[in-house]
Image: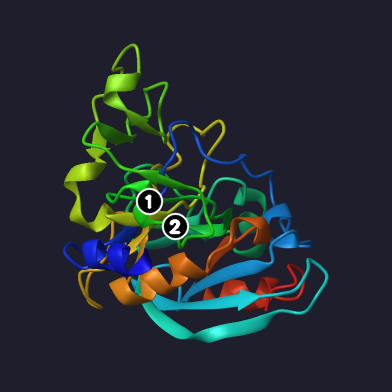
Amino acid sequence: MMQRFLGAFTRTIACVIALTVVAPGAQAQSASANRPPPVVARAEQLVVVTTADWDSLSGTMRRFQRASAKAPWRAIGGSMPIVVGRTGLAWGVGFDDAGSALDPKGPHKHEGDGRSPAGAFPLDTLFGFAPSDSATWTHLPYTQLLPSTDCVDDSASTHYNTVVRRDAVPQLDWSSAEHMRTVGQYRIGVIVSYNAAPPVKGRGSCIFLHIWNGPASTTAGCTALDANELLTVASWLDKPKHPALVQLPRKMYERLKRSWALP
């Protein structure tokens, strides 16, 4: 089955995105610089993205796994080059207090700022263009994108920062959304559960990991990497292991490494 899925995958650029018909995951509580965020404390799989500083447009991704929430982390594979938002990183929802304590001058994410969110966020859903029987290799819930699937980035909408089907809601109350099925980069994906359940209006939406257009490219606020490496990450993620993304400038990562029990 995976061979069949890979065949479909290679016909179009792939990506990792958030996909659910409602806001995915539970909104993070305000994080502290002195203890691990709950999403990190329970994680047994960690995707770590670091950049040189807030305004850097590229960085690296590494993977780590542990046998339990109390066990030591071990590296999985090598580092992978990534690109981030066109203006860098910014503290995401749930990390404003910790961010202000660590770096009062650090930016805080807002809709349309072109920055990828810094902090720690769950990864819990796989999506793609292919039918479900082509994705039996995954260890995450899988949902097929349809031509009517939108990711709503209109902060005035009741569906802000959710992925919905236009033909499945009683009223279209948004003026701006990504038509997911028309975007080649969204052929396959994994949710980055940012600013969710319920979303804070204007703090950013539709945040994904996705395939880049090359090492010199940028995104609108997502994190992007090579298609083959992305597929490696997607096939490794395992829902029962509570996978999470930790994304920070390198200096912030080093300052939080001990208190957050990071690898």
Left or right position of 56 against 248: left
The disc labelled 2 sits on which kind of residue?
A: Thr
The vertical placement of 208 against 229, above or below, is above
Q: Residue furthest top?
A: 170
Q: Which residue is at 26% across, 37% downward?
A: 146
Q: Which residue is at 58% across, 62% downward?
A: 238
Tag 2 residue = 136
Disc 2: CA contacts within 10 A as few (<14), some (14-19) or many (>=20)? some
Quadrant in which residue 151 is drawn: top left
Q: Which residue is at 57% across, 82% downward?
A: 76
Disc 1: CA contacts within 10 A as few (<14), some (14-19) or many (>=20)? few
Q: Are marks 2 and 1 in contact (CB under 8 Å)?
A: yes
The disc labelled 1 sits on which kind of residue?
A: Asp
Horizontal and vertical percent for residue 221?
A: 35, 55
Horizontal and vertical percent for residue 74?
A: 67, 83
Left or right position of 119 against 128: right
Q: Secondary structure at mark 2?
A: loop
Instruction: Please name whichever residue, 80 or 10, is drawn nearer the observer in this view of the structure.
Output: 10
Give the number of the disc on residue 61: none
Instruction: Please name whichever residue, 114 or 72, is drawn nearer the observer in this view of the structure.
Output: 72
Left or right position of 60 against 87: right
User: What is the quadrant of the C terminus in the image?
Assistant: bottom right
Quadrant in which residue 70 is drawn: bottom right
Tag 1 residue = 133
How many numbered dots are placed on residues in this image? Answer: 2
